[in-house]
Image (tube, grey):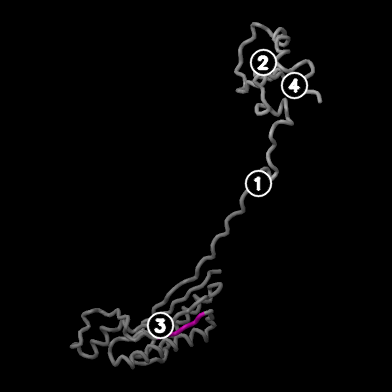
Amino acid sequence: MKTKTITLRMFYAAVLGMSANAAVAQVPDNDGYLFDTRGVVARSGYGLCWQTTRWTPAKAIAECDPDLVKKPDAPAVAAAALAAVAAPAPVAPPRKCDFAESLASDATFGFGKADLTAGAKKQLDVVAAKAGACASISSVAVTGHTDRIGSAKSNQALSERRAGAVKAYLESKGVKAASFTAAGVANTQSMANVNCGAKLPQKKLVACLAPDRRVVVDVQGLAK
């Protein structure tokens, strides 16, 4: 098989054809081949590259010995092509439709009562409208609270009845959820001012403990 390159033994013949006064140019950092003053690999009259005595297959360049130059693996080329493709735009996470409404019990029920007033229904209509604006509702939790007046047993039962009344009204307005709960906690989560002493007259004590008498509606869902 004929070699595609010419060894250094023919080097001197090529040197005689070069101009002695040519300006010296920066040559490539590869001493396996002979380069002219322009930094271009020197070739024979047959167009073959000149090799030096320091040439080894590891110094082969594609211009002169393409068969000896390692070609990139097909998977690597494919991976590089895929990397060059613009990544798809990130998908924005779904927006939440979470909110909570605290309904003052005095405006929602009569004192010691569990029947919804006309004012209560107006408040709950607003809650139902907000829930209806959501794309979906995952959960609705209704929690009833009372003040400390009365026995623990009666307050627990009252808080549960109030929570149940709110839940039933919201459902009647079309509010649906994967989880819809109603629970009463009596006066275990008091918010009233610590100055509501037991020695206050009944009427003033009832007014002072008003913040405790409330129903909280907690809605969680996804926005449209």
Which quadrant would residue 33 be assigned to in this image? top right
Vertical relation: 86 (above or below) 198: above
Q: Position of residue 118 (x, y in %)?
A: 43, 88
Horizontally, residue 84 falls left or right of residue 109, namely right
- Determine whether the residue tagged by mark 1 lies in a helix, strand or loop: helix
- Quadrant containing the N terminus in the rendered view: top right
Quickly name the residue at label 1: 79
Q: Earlier in the sequence, mark 2 or mark 3?
A: 2
Distance of label 2 from label 1 (alpha carbons): 38 Å
Numbered tag placed on residue 177 in the rendering? none
Horizontally, residue 23 falls left or right of residue 176, namely right
- Label 4–label 3 contact, CB within 8 A: no
Distance of label 2 from label 3 (alpha carbons): 90 Å
The magenta span reads 179-183
Vertical relation: 111 (above or below) 44: below
Quickly name the residue at label 4: 5
Q: Is residue 204 magenta?
A: no
- Label 2–label 3 contact, CB within 8 A: no
Q: Position of residue 195 (x, y in %)?
A: 21, 80
Q: Main secondary structure of the magenta part?
A: strand
Q: Which sits in the foreground, 3 or 217?
A: 3
Foreground: disc 2 or disc 4: 4
- Determine whether the residue tagged by mark 4 lies in a helix, strand or loop: loop
Name which residue type carries label 2.
Asp
Residue extending farthest to the left is: 199
- Determine whether the residue tagged by mark 3 lies in a helix, strand or loop: strand
Quickly name the residue at label 3: 143
Residue 106 visible within the image? no
Horizontally, residue 108 falls left or right of residue 64, namely left
Name which residue type carries label 1.
Ala
- Determine whether the residue tagged by mark 2 lies in a helix, strand or loop: loop
Q: Which sits in the foreground, 156 or 63?
A: 63
